[in-house]
């Protein structure tokens, strides 16, 4: 995977704009950064402190999401195409 230079001193708004794939880890952690007016002023370190999350864990999640998006693998490892399409799901059930 490619190295993504997301550091604790970056503003959360800049991170979300530069790497849109980072929205998913923020939502997964129930962080209200998306659409927040303070996102233009808070750094990732601030956000980690506010939400009581270890900054290194938050940075790893954001870096992994951004790198995965750049490499083209944005789907969740649990994603199965047959779950998304009812016709495929039916066809898979009939084959069994």
Image: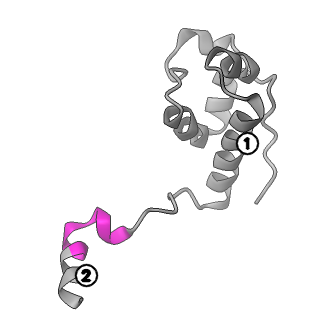
Say which label, 2 or 1, has the lower sequence index.
1
Q: Position of residue 76 (x, y in %)?
A: 50, 57
Q: Secondary structure at mark 1?
A: helix
* Residue 22 x %, y %: 61, 38
How far across and how far down the image is residue 6, in percent?
78, 36
Q: Could you tell whether 4 is left or right of 70 in the image?
A: right
The kind of secondary structure the magenta stretch mainly shows is helix
- Dot 1 surroundings within 10 Å: few (below 14), some, or many (20 or more)? some
Q: Could you say which quadrant of the image residue 94 lies in? A: bottom left
Q: SS for tag 2? A: helix
Give the CA separation, mark 2 to mark 1: 37 Å
Quadrant of res 83:
bottom left
Residue 42 in the image, given as x and y percentages of width and height:
69, 13
Instruction: Give the quarter of the figure containing the N terminus.
Output: bottom right
Residue 47 colored in magenta in the image: no
Residue tagged 2: 92
Position of 71 with respect to 86 (left or right) is: right
Q: Which residues are magenta?
A: 81-89
Tell me the tag on residue 48.
none
Instruction: Tell me: 86 left or right of 75.
Output: left
Question: Disc 1 marks which residue?
Answer: 60
At 61% from the left and 19% from the top, the residue drawn is 51
Q: How many marks?
A: 2
- The residue under the point 19% across, 73% down is 87
Q: Nearer the viewer, residue 43 or 56?
A: 56
Residue 5 lies, with reference to residue 50, above or below; the image says below
Q: What residue appears at the point 24 percent right and 89 percent down from the top-left corner?
A: 96
Q: Quadrant of residue 38?
A: top right
Name the residue rendered at 53%, 40% in the picture: 24
């Amino acid at each position: 995977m490619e190295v993504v230079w997301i550091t604790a001193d970056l503003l959360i708004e800049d991170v979300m704009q530069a790497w849109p794939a980072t929205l998913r880890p923020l939502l997964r952690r129930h962080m209200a950064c998306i659409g927040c007016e303070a996102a233009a002023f808070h750094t990732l370190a601030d956000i980690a402190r506010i939400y009581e999350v270890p900054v290194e864990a938050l940075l790893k999640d954001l870096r992994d999401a951004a790198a995965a998006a750049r490499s083209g693998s944005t789907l969740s490892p649990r994603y199965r195409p047959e779950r998304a399409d009812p016709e495929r799901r039916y066809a898979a059930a009939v084959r069994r």
